[in-house]
Amino acid sequence: MSEDVFRLNSLFDFYGELLTENQRSAFMYYYHMDYTLNEISEKIGISKQGVSENLKRAIKELENYERVLKLEEKYNKINSIISEVDKKLELLKDENYKEFLTKKLTEITEELDK
């Protein structure tokens, strides 16, 4: 279950702005703030069933966006490559070159995390 929640939150980070306001709010309250369906219902002013439907649609939309755009998949692959290169950097003898490459990897990682 926690892997599913972790993945959904990751997808939300990539695609959350593409959801409707009710989907985004329901998702945030449910997955980020651990609200119950009743609490969310009161907070955003729709029925409990409406909250449930918005959550289901939000999850479906997030998964569809990832299926088509593959941003999370690409992000994970790039981070894996960066980690691999970072490990190889430890083997370099030239400290100036090593420092330069480490700085560039850090810049790439920071840009990806924006």
Image (cartoon, rainbow, N blue to C red):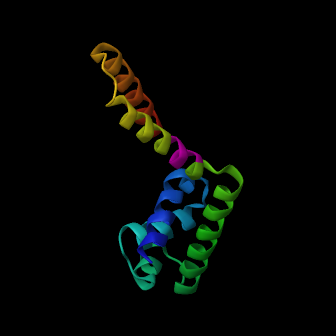
Above or below: residue 112 compared with residue 55? above
Question: Which quarter of the rendering shows the C terminus?
Answer: top left
Residue located 63% across and 64% down the image: 63
Confirm whether residue 113 shows in the render.
no
- Viewer-proximal residue among 77 and 51: 77
Confirm whether residue 12 shows in the render.
yes
In the rendered image, residue 49, in percent from the top left (x then y), is placed at 57, 86
Residue located 36% across and 29% down the image: 89
Question: In the displayed image of the protein, which residue is found farthest to the right?
Answer: 68
- Viewer-proximal residue among 5 and 39: 5
Residue located 37% across and 37% down the image: 87
Above or below: residue 107 compared with residue 87? above
Q: Which residues are magenta?
A: 74-78
Q: How many marks?
A: 0
Residue located 28% across and 17% down the image: 95
In the rendered image, residue 54, in percent from the top left (x then y), is placed at 59, 74
> Is 97 positioned to the left or the right of 57 in the image?
left
Q: Was residue 76 drawn as part of the magenta stretch in this picture?
A: yes
> Is 28 positioned to the left or the right of 90 in the image?
right
In the rendered image, residue 66, in percent from the top left (x then y), is placed at 64, 56
Dominant SS in magenta = helix
Q: Was residue 6 drawn as part of the magenta stretch in this picture?
A: no
- Viewer-proximal residue among 83 and 41: 83
